[in-house]
Image: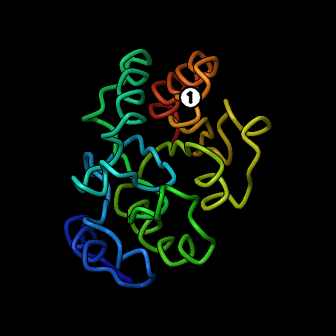
Amino acid sequence: MDPIDLPHLDRQISACHLCPLSEGRTLAVPGCGPAPADIMLVGEAPGKEEDLTGKPFVGRAGRLLDGALVQAGLERSKVFITSVIKCRPPQNRKPKKKEIDRCRPYLQSQIEILHPNVICLMGNTAALAVLGRQGIANLRGRILEDRYLVTFHPAAVLRNRNLMNDFVSDLKMLNTGSSRLV
């Protein structure tokens, strides 16, 4: 896979049939935001509302993310947002390893095209897919490998509102991290 630009990659993702998830989707969800992007957010997978619209983080978790970005002093329009996999798993289950493996080249291409200074991996699925590591308690809140920030997934914050302050605090690091990382 050697895309020329982001629109070309988006078309590839939208036409993808590399795994069975494509059979049940309404729309693939490539991601959205500026290109190039200083900051990239990576979630787990599209949910129901994302599947219907083709846009990332537009459901309940997306609304929570929007509020957290505002609290962190970040504008959503200046952040590229995507997920590890680009099609909704049935009943919003966790993506399977094969599905992640099939979608990983798309995410890697997005990273190459966008050249983000900092990549925020939201949740264990994103941390495992990109870094090969998981364990939010041990990984969150610090920049790893000079580029990656691991934090909670917004859906986890929805389930446990006590995580919100830490989530916003992590997102604030993106504001300072994106300008100092090269």
Q: Amino acid at mark 1?
A: Val
The single residue placed furthest to the right in the displayed view is 138
What is the secondary structure assignment of the residue under circle 1? helix
Residue corresponding to mark 1: 157
Q: Quadrant of residue 141?
A: top right
Q: Nearer the viewer, residue 124 or 142?
A: 124
How many numbered marks does the figure carry? 1
Q: Which residue shows up at 55% across the image and 39% down it?
A: 153
Q: Where the N terminus falls, by quadrant?
A: bottom left
Colouring method of the image:
rainbow
Instruction: Give percent across and percent down for residue 181.
Output: 52, 38
In the image, is 6 to the left or to the right of 103?
Answer: left
Q: Is residue 48 above or below residue 62?
A: below
Q: Which residue shows up at 63% across the image and 40% down it?
A: 150
Instruction: Give percent across and percent down for residue 164.
Output: 56, 19
Q: Is residue 104 above or below residue 180?
A: below
Q: Nearer the viewer, residue 174 or 100?
A: 100
Instruction: Give percent across and percent down for residue 38.
Output: 38, 41
Q: Quadrant of residue 137?
A: top right
Q: Which residue shows up at 30% across the image and 66% down it?
A: 28
Q: Is residue 158 above or below residue 181?
A: above
Q: Is residue 114 above or below residue 1?
A: above
Q: Residues within 10 Å of mark 1 (few under 14, many from 20)?
A: some
Q: Which residue shows up at 37% across the image and 46% down it?
A: 81
Instruction: Give percent across and percent down for residue 155.
Output: 52, 37
